Image: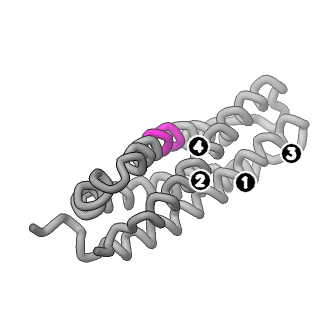
């Protein structure tokens, strides 16, 4: 049986991982900038720059993850993990939920950071910091879980 994109699964996994690291770093930088805004630092340029980087990288990573999913589902999950490591399957599903929530938070924080005026009230800056910080934390968690699952059985290998 042939699975969609199975032949290019290793390349897709590599691009997915690079985009994942990009998302981790961009969301972390956006969160740090948002926290600096709460203490009155002028960070509008950083919020705009890292906001679009974070949003673009996490959306692109999600798209590559969707391309990888059929090969993962058939060749890794059904063929190995459900039988030999059911806890890893549950961990992967949890990672997918974290990633979906992180996507919404990061994109929302990006728009909120873009709209934050230089003289924003402290409450608005704190709300942005909370939104961006939570998004970054979820991206970190999803990345670490993804690395663990991939170390267990990467897609594109027998």
Residue labelled with disc 2: 54
At a point 37% along the width and 76% down the height, the residue shown is: 11
Say which label, 1 or 2, has the lower sequence index.
1
- Dividing the picture into quadrants, the one containing residue 137 is top right
Residue labelled with disc 4: 138
Residues packed near mark 1 inside 10 Å, few (<14), some (14 to 19) or many (20 plus): many
Residues packed near mark 4 inside 10 Å, few (<14), some (14 to 19) or many (20 plus): many
Say which label, 4 or 3, has the lower sequence index.
3
- SS at circle 3: loop
Closer to the camera, 105 or 125? 105
Q: Is residue 34 left or right of residue 106?
A: right
Q: Which mark is residue 51?
A: none
Q: CA distance from mark 2 to mark 4?
A: 13 Å
Magenta span: 97-102
Residue 65 in the image: state x and y as whole percent.
38, 57
At a point 78% along the width and 31% down the height, the residue shown is: 125
- SS at circle 2: helix
Residue labelled with disc 3: 42
Closer to the camera, 48 or 4? 4
Say which label, 1 or 4, has the lower sequence index.
1
Q: Which mark is residue 29?
A: 1
Could you tell me which quadrant the N terminus lies in?
bottom left
The answer to whether mark 1 and mark 2 are in CB contact below 8 A is yes
């Amino acid at each position: 049986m042939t699975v969609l994109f199975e032949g290019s699964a290793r390349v897709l996994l590599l691009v997915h991982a690079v985009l994942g690291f990009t998302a981790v770093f961009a969301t972390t930088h956006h969160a740090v900038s948002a926290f600096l805004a709460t203490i009155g630092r002028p960070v509008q340029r950083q919020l705009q720059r890292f906001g679009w980087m974070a949003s673009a990288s996490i959306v692109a990573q999600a798209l590559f993850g969707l391309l990888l999913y059929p090969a993962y589902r058939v060749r890794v999950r059904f063929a190995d993990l459900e039988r030999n490591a059911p806890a890893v399957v549950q961990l992967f599903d949890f990672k997918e939920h974290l990633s979906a929530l992180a996507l919404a938070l990061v994109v929302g924080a990006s728009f909120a950071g873009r709209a934050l005026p230089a003289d924003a009230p402290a409450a608005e800056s704190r709300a942005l910091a909370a939104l961006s910080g939570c998004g970054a934390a979820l991206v970190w968690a999803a990345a670490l879980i993804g690395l663990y699952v991939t170390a267990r059985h990467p897609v594109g290998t027998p």
